Amino acid sequence: MRVIGLISGTSHDAIEAAAVDFDLVGERIDARIVASAGVPYAPDLRRRLLAALPPGETTAAEICALDTLIGHAFAEAAASLELDRPADLVCSHGQTIFHWVDGRRALGGLQLGQPAWIAERLGVPVVSDVRARDIAAGGQGAPLASIFDVLLLGGSERPCAALNLGGIANVTVMRPGEEPIAYDTGPANALLDLAIAAGTGGAETFDRDGARARRGRVDSALLERLLTEPYYALPPPKTTGKELFHSEYLGSTDLSLDDLLATLAALTTETVARELERYGVERVVASGGGTRNRAIMDGLARRLPEVELETFEQLGVASESKEAVVFALIGFLTAHGLAGAVPSCTGAGRAAILGTITPGRGPLVLPAPASVRPSRLVLEGFVEAVA
Ligand SMILES: Nc1ncnc2c1ncn2[C@@H]1O[C@H](COP(=O)(O)OP(=O)(O)O)[C@@H](O)[C@H]1O
Ligand SMILES: [Mg+2]
């Protein structure tokens, strides 16, 4: 079955699309990425989206417009993949506009990008709204990458972690003989992107390769103050987002922009490193745009000299497309009647089959439900260097 996975994360930079061919072979899922692309949001749409996010205020009319326009954009991103044959299914995460949490409990969430536009453009069924069902089952609705991480890396004989450095950083921690856990550790690029946009009047939207952060000096007083954020002390499972780490979070500072960026990169490094240390992680496979920020990646390597730190990219999967592959997998699982959530990771009371299904052009025909639960995923081209 060929599935297109679509997502735009909390950085609101681009729609990541990946077409993946899946085969269910007994307990094993074989996967092959056949195409992938990152399609940046049109600047106007991105501006409108950012304006609607907290701490900004918005209207029902604007949410309706954004739902529609993001639906168009996701449909075009899916259609832009060059494929030798069409996909059988699309799974679209959409764009999170609000993740409603109260302390450690997730109460709801809203993803925009009306799936009808995708189904109409591609003519195939669309799985969408993938977080809601896990939240209804008592979970955080996140991090949903955990099912992919556990199937791909969970067989390791050493404690290992998958780390995604998007707007927010999240980890899936897998230890032999223990249930896997997953949660958001805190901001990865979220505050960095906001600081550089504010500091350059919008001329720069991210710190390319972490060049400014590497020129700057970490301000230890500010770093200490930022580390007192209560979120970091909450036990997992827990999730966060731009509702907390928004444009007014930092307040005003008299640091130079480069020093501020150095301090924020150090905040990411420190909050991630503490969590990896807590669980004695020996190997980390990182993904997301933050893997291109050398201040973060070099900082992690310095802070955790004993830990083997690799990127998905080094292992054969483009770091930005990992999350699109995750949602393609979730679509495949849903289509086969299989749960896409890992309860020990999301905190749900049970493993739910995720999503809402919009039919394609014809009647909705799904594969026969799978009779066995998959226990591992083999991704073609992914170099599983260490056992
Ligand atoms: N070359 C780069 N150097 C530094 N940071 C980068 C680079 N490329 C991308 N990023 C960072 O990664 C972010 C996008 O990462 P992504 O994985 O798409 O996150 P999200 O899932 O939140 O959208 C950008 O906003 C930027 O901060
Ligand atoms: Mg992105």
Image (cartoon, grey):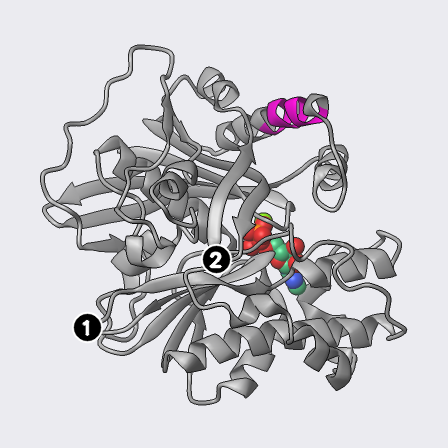
Quadrant, the C terminus? bottom left
The mark lying in front, picked from 2 and 1, is: 2
The residue segment tinted magenta is: 62-70
Question: What is the crowding at mark 1: few (fewer than 14 residues within 10 Å), some, or many (at least 20)?
Answer: few
Residue at image mark 1? 177
Q: Is residue 100 left or right of residue 350?
A: right
Which residue is more in the foreground, 175 or 323?
Answer: 175
Vertical position of residue 352 compared to residue 87: above or below: below
- Which element carries disc 1, helix, strand or loop? loop
Q: Quadrant of residue 175?
A: bottom left
Q: Residue at x 56, y 57 (%)?
A: 166
Instruction: Tell me the CA gap for discs 2 and 1.
Output: 26 Å
- Which element carries disc 2, helix, strand or loop? loop
Q: Position of residue 324 (x, y in %)?
A: 45, 45
Q: Quadrant of residue 173?
A: bottom left
Residue 321: say if magenta.
no
Q: Amino acid at mark 2?
A: Arg
Residue 132 seen in the current view: yes
Residue 20 seen in the current view: no
Q: Position of residue 15 (x, y in %)?
A: 57, 40
Q: Which mark is residue 104?
A: 2
